[in-house]
């Protein structure tokens, strides 16, 4: 699969996060606890040190995290990461979960916050450097692609630019022409490190 091209420019203005469902502190603590158990249960030969380090770092952040800043989707991503590690996961699955947890840790470190938070995206859809209008951008957390019946998130408005607010993580991004159903190629992008990002998404 071609990865396409995606360029990121930091927004100089920080947009306010959109409201999202909140979770309870005990739910967050339980989800991270399940994740730690799943990581510890992996055979040492297949458990990357980066995976254990990321899970332990998140565990240490539970007490200082404001649960009001953690969405249901973020909580579900932690639970799903734990589920993926159960049994005998493949190397690809382990690597996927490791990269997702590392992205979440990097976001926390960059902004000096606990877990959660949101990133506001403005996405320009471009072809040969020129804007392509009336495209809806969709996003799917990469580890959610391994879970059935998880629909992608849709931009609040069509391009260009399209706008949406996501939890920090690694996402497949693509554009959809709602009139024809045509879709662009998916591009993997880490939505982390800033409260707002401007993304240029190239359309073939």
Image: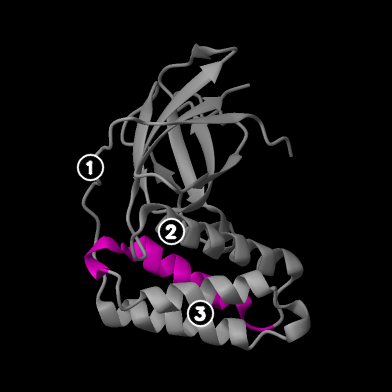
Specify whether residue 82 is painted magenta.
Answer: yes
Magenta part of the chain: 66-87
Q: Which mark is residue 16?
A: 1
Rate crowding at label 2 as few (under 14), some (14 to 19) or many (20 or more) other CA atoms within 10 Å: few
Residue lying at 67% horizontally and 74% vertically, measured from the top left? 49
Residue lying at 25% horizontally and 76% vertically, measured from the top left? 24
The residue labelled by disc 2 is 109
Q: Is residue 84 visible?
A: no
Which residue is nearer to you in this view: 68 or 22? 68
The residue labelled by disc 3 is 35
Of the two numbered discs 3 and 1 on the same chain, state the one appearing first in sequence. 1
Counting from the top left corner in percent of width and height, residue 167 is at 38, 53
Asked if 132 appears above or below 64 in the picture, the reply is above
Counting from the top left corner in percent of width and height, residue 63 is at 31, 78
Asked if 37 appears above or below 78 in the picture, the reply is below
| Extreme residue toward the right, this view | 45
Counting from the top left corner in percent of width and height, residue 171 is at 52, 48
Quarter of the figure that contains the C terminus? top right
Is label 3 in a helix, a strand or a loop?
helix
How many angstroms separate mark 3 from mark 1 (CA)? Answer: 30 Å
Counting from the top left corner in percent of width and height, residue 69 is at 26, 61
163 relative position to 173: left or right: left
Is label 1 in a helix, a strand or a loop?
loop
């Amino acid at each position: 699969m071609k990865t396409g091209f995606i360029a990121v420019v930091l927004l100089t203005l920080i947009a306010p996060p959109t409201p999202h469902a909140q979770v309870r502190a005990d739910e967050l603590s339980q989800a991270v606890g399940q994740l730690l158990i799943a990581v510890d249960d992996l055979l040492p030969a297949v458990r990357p040190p980066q995976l254990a380090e990321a899970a332990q770092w998140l565990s240490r952040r539970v007490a200082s995290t404001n649960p009001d800043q953690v969405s249901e989707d973020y909580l579900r991503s932690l639970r799903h990461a734990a589920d993926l590690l159960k049994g005998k996961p493949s190397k690809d699955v382990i690597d996927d979960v490791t990269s997702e947890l590392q992205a979440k840790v990097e976001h926390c470190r960059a902004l000096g916050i606990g877990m959660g938070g949101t990133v506001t995206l403005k996405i320009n859809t471009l072809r040969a450097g020129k804007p392509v209008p009336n495209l809806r951008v969709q996003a799917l957390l990469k580890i959610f692609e391994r879970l059935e019946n998880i629909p992608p998130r849709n931009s609040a408005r069509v391009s260009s630019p399209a706008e949406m607010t996501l939890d920090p993580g690694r996402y497949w991004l693509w554009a959809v022409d709602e009139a024809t159903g045509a879709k662009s190629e998916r591009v993997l992008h880490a939505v982390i490190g800033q409260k707002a990002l401007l993304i240029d998404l190239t359309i073939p």
